[in-house]
Amino acid sequence: MNFVLHRTAHTALLAASFLAIAACTTLTDTPPADPQKMIDERVAVMKSYIGALSASTQYTQDKATAAAAKAKVAAARNGVAAARSLFPRGTALGDRGVARSRALSTIFANRADFDAKFDALAANFAALDAALAKNAKADATAALASTKKACLVCHDKYRAPED
Ligand code: HEC
């Protein structure tokens, strides 16, 4: 009896996770009704990354406390998952309803690579966060440099030059 109950719960869980996966696929494959709104949202998230980098730079130059920088980095870390979900198909430069964007449509043909670049960014922010938590300036300086590289490596490939 117990076994049967267990199996049923397991099947329900499995079904739920398949549904969740289906929902994710839909999210990245169906263009949103208002692409520009989504673009503006992700640009705002990306701008919070700049705040995290500046606060961390100030910390490494003795112009801000580790705690102040850590607060900004924590917010930016939350923003990585958010930004990742804000790049569905139909939200790049040249897509219908897109007035302003620097996102290249090659993102959609290279989704796994694009997502891996977000994963790398998340890992770098985590290292920076850990260094700030320990108030370890040399570690924070190294993590900051490597975080900036994670930004550039994605921008170089998937963001159009400024016009
Ligand atoms: C996985 C790819 C990726 C990573 C990693 C990434 N960005 Fe971006 N970023 C983009 C894309 C694509 C755009 C263009 C979005 C648009 O205009 O629709 C963008 C836009 C921006 C913008 C908006 C203003 C502008 O000039 O386009 C800022 C600011 C920005 N990124 C900062 C950063 C910083 C700082 C980091 C690292 C801490 C970072 N980004 C990491 C892909 C990325």
Image (cartoon, rainbow, N blue to C red):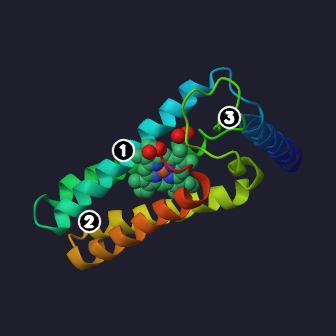
Depth order, front residue of 23/4: 23
Q: Residues within 10 Å of mark 2 (few under 14, many from 20)?
A: many
Horizontal and vertical percent for residue 85? Answer: 61, 41
First along the sequence among labels 1 and 2: 1
Residue 6 vs residue 127: left or right?
Answer: right
In the picture of the structure, the residue carrying the numbered disc 2 is: 132
Count residues near mark 3 (Cα–Cα under 10 Å), then give few for <14, some for 14-19, many for 20+: some
Discs 1/2, front: 1
Q: Which residue matches tag 3?
A: 94
Q: Residue at 18% of width from left, 63% of height from top?
A: 59
| Element at label 3 | loop
Residue placed furthest toward the top: 33
Q: In the displayed structure, does residue 146 sit left or right of residue 86?
A: left
The N terminus: image quadrant: top right
Report the residue at 18% width, 60% height from top: 58
- The residue under label 1 is 48
Q: Secondary structure at mark 2?
A: helix
Does label 1 point to a residue whose CB lies under 8 Å from ligand 1? no
- Estimate the x, y position of residue 90 in percent, counting from the top left: 71, 34
What separation in Å lies between label 1 and label 2 (alpha carbons)?
A: 17 Å
| Residue type indicated by callout 1 | Ser
Task: Tell me the mark number nearer the camera, choosing from 1 and 3.
Answer: 3
